[in-house]
Amino acid sequence: MNWILRYWEEIESGNIIVSNKVHKIYKRLVDEINNPKGDWIFDEERSERPIQFIETFCRQSKGEWIGRPVQLQLFQKAYISALFGFVHKETGIRRFKETLFLVARKNGKSTMLSGIALYMLVADGEGGAEVYSVATKKDQARIVFTEAVNMVKQSPALSKHIHKRKSDMYMPLTFSKMEPLASDSNSLDGLNSHCVIIDELHAIKDRNLYEVMKQSMSARRQPLLVMITTSGTVRECIYDDIYDYACKVTDGVIEDDRFLPVLYELDSRDEWTDWRMWQKANPGLGTIKKVEDLTEKVERAKANPKDLPGVLCKDFNIRDTVAGMWLTFEDINNEETFDIEEFKDSYAVGGADLSSTTDLTCATLIFMKPDSKKKYVLQQYFLPEDLLEKRVVEDKIPYDKWRDRGLLTTTPGNKVDYHYVTDWFVKMFREYGIRPLWIGYDPWNSQYWIQEMNDAGFDMVEVRQGYKTLSQPMKELEADLKAHMINYNNNPILKWCLTNTSVKVDENGNIRPVKGQNQRQRIDGAVSLLIAYVILQQKLNDYLALI
């Protein structure tokens, strides 16, 4: 049985209601099963093995089902099938190395995690497998471990081969072990992990724990890092980083074939009172999680607003409002493209965000056509060559692929050479006859570059980065993006920068762009576009008269 296709049939028929993000990811998986592309194929037999193992050998260890064989729900089977079923068409190595599974509380996540952990310990064909259940505190790390221990005790077949020791479970036949670890453990160094389980990722404030455990898997042939969590209340922590990354992979902003995001959540905060939508965050509702219990919580939250944040966060995976979130992916996404030849020998309006010399730098050109309100945007990005590999690894952003596509230019050394920015504007003029009538710039740290641009014959216009200058153009830019009146050639770097952009509001309702505390979230492309937009708004009548 192909459980992914079965699950998709139920979703498409309307029998199962899922979030937009779950719908997107399973549609992609189904497309990849039916029309394999690249190096990965779906092996139905491989996808079935962990499911058969869990349902054959693992037994419930809690509540009214204690002692009974684990019966996985369809959503769990589909997820496990995806996690284990996609393999390399030549080597057979498992595709997914890392996964985030977001689901509301009481939807059977610990049971599923324990089953996956035992499969990786016993049946994944890895000698000397090391499986770790990891959390900030040892008590949290022990939850999955203890459930796995109890599953083994309940199973005559497993208990013959797996022995509980003081701090771990050990399988002598393959020299494999499972152990709970906490961030304050003295034994985080020197690990050789085959599988790492992180339960309740939202509770982990220290990114180092995640990085150390991920690095510990580097010597294994096909390791697996599984993160399962509800939403959290701590902002700008590792959970926010991984969740945002998962959203970008889901939406296609970032391509990562080795990361599987499955995000069960409400699509809108307004859906929490609509019982028909509850399944979006609670795929086990009615089978694992009791409808009457959730109904009681919702009614209590309606009567007492103090209970609402907890219900929204833990039962519906609605995060605390992320301060200043500007646009949704749906607002931003526009897959229209254009050919630069369309604008040969034409006028444009330019903008540039030089940022710091070690950061991402962006140059922008905006074009319009007579009798049309649509804007066309062309951008070029710049990054120091010496930092490229580091940024790809640390930021998990495909700068190297963007460079190979010609969207990003690397400049020699460890600092951006602004001569390359000048050269790009000059190249656009010499090769295509594109002349920017005005180019906006942030006066901070740009004195020498401005002189160089003036010497090259460009009319440079200062754009200060305060509310007074940026607010109205940013609101105009927002409206045009939402109306899909900006064709930015489906540039993935700009799309990524826009999704990273937050907004800060003053007491008068004026706005300006900011980024969050996560320094990996670059917004330079959005700022460069906004600077060009400021000039376009200031000079619009003059520009339209010339085109």
Image: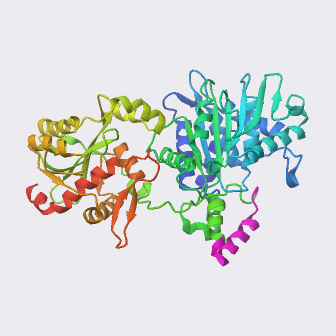
Q: Quadrant of the N terminus?
A: top right
Towards the viewer: 51 or 182: 182
Is residue 521 in the magenta section?
no
Which residue is outermost to the bottom?
303
Visible in this render: residue 434? no
Visible in this render: residue 4? yes
- Horizontally, residue 395 falls left or right of residue 525, namely right
The picture places residue 342, in percent across and down from the top left corner, at 18, 44
Residue at horizontal 39%, vertical 35%? 399
- Horizontally, residue 157 falls left or right of residue 180, namely right
Is residue 288 in the magenta section?
yes
Towards the viewer: 115 or 144: 144
Residue at horizontal 63%, vertical 35%? 213
The picture places residue 446, in percent across and down from the top left corner, at 22, 46
Total marks shown come to 0
Q: On screen, 324 above or below 359?
A: below
Q: On screen, 8 above or below 392?
A: below
Would you say the magenta stretch is mainly helix, strand or loop? helix
- Horizontally, residue 229 falls left or right of residue 151, namely left
Q: Quarter of the image holding residue 493?
A: top left
The picture places residue 35, in percent across and down from the top left corner, at 51, 35
Span shown in magenta: 287-306
- Horizontally, residue 80 falls left or right of residue 254, namely right
Here the colouring is: rainbow
Q: On screen, 176 above or below 422?
A: above
The picture places residue 437, in percent across and down from the top left corner, at 12, 51
Residue at horizontal 55%, vertical 69%? 270
Q: Quadrant of the C terminus?
A: bottom left
